[in-house]
Image (cartoon, rainbow, N blue to C red):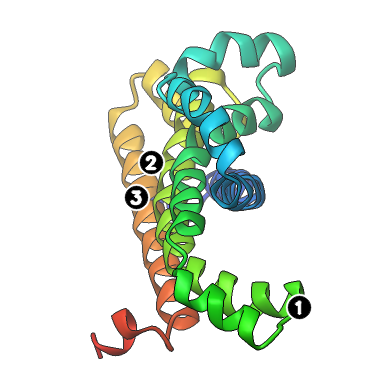
Amino acid sequence: MISLVGQGQFWTALLDTGVTWAIGLAMCSLVGTAVGLFVGSNRFASRSTRFAFDFMRTIPPVALVPLALLLYGPTRAMVLLLVISGAVWPLLIQSVYAAQQQEALLGDVAKSFRLNRRTRFLHIFWPSCLPFVLSGLRVTGTICLLLTVSGELLGGAPGIGAEIQLALNAVDNPRMYAEVGAAALLGVAVNVVLGALRTRVLRWHPSVRGGR
């Protein structure tokens, strides 16, 4: 591990993994939150998509590696296809539940005060959904990193996963274990950052204020 810290190749691989993870998480956040809140807010859409969501989220992302390699080769786009197909579901499902758990009383109050749609969304709907969404985001962030490293390892895309595979092929076990440890530390950092983000954003929420 000490010897790796002084090598530019190691930091380049770590940066590639971090960038791929960040892009994948951003895309999962956009798609999962938007689709989830829409589906959860629409009874017809919720009933129509229930089977499709249950079916699609059970497909192992690793099973898509041959297809992703055929379409994009050993590139970042290939890894992102695996990441989005496997990591978007926790956030999407949490967003669906968030939209469905809206209190009817708050809606009645909004109607009584004749609040417009924008005000209802910003001050009633979105704050009520935020705890669910951020919980899903934390799970999605961890899965994004797991799938990023797995995609790099299995598909050969640039990143720490590809470096692990190269060390394994060269029977360089010390280097391989050091890079596995680096990937694990990256996972810890991701979890800490997302946890801190949740605490900061939800500092007004009783679940956070009560824990202080």
Query: Which residue is drawn at the image coordinates 66% and 88% (left, top)?
Result: 113
Question: Gap in Å between the C-alphas at discs 1 and 3?
Answer: 57 Å
Give the residue type that dot 1 points to.
Answer: Asn
200 with respect to 180 (left or right) = right
Give x and y (percent) for residue 49.
55, 30
Tell me which corner region of the image, top left, top right, bottom left or bottom right, holds residue 199. Answer: bottom left
Depth order, front residue of 4/183 = 183
What SS does tag 2 mark? Answer: helix
x and y, in percent, of residue 164 in the image: 42, 30
Number of other residues with Cα within 10 Å of mark 1, as a class: few under 14, some 14 to 19, many 20 or more = few
Residue at figure coordinates x 40%, y 62% from the top left? 189
Disc 1 or 2, which lies upstream in sequence? 1
Q: Amino acid at mark 3?
A: Met
Q: Position of residue 15 (x, y in %)?
A: 60, 50
Badge number at residue 179 = 2
The residue that label 3 is drawn on is 1
- Residue hosting label 1: 116
Side of 143 where 70 appears, left or right: right
Name the image quarter holding residue 114.
Answer: bottom right
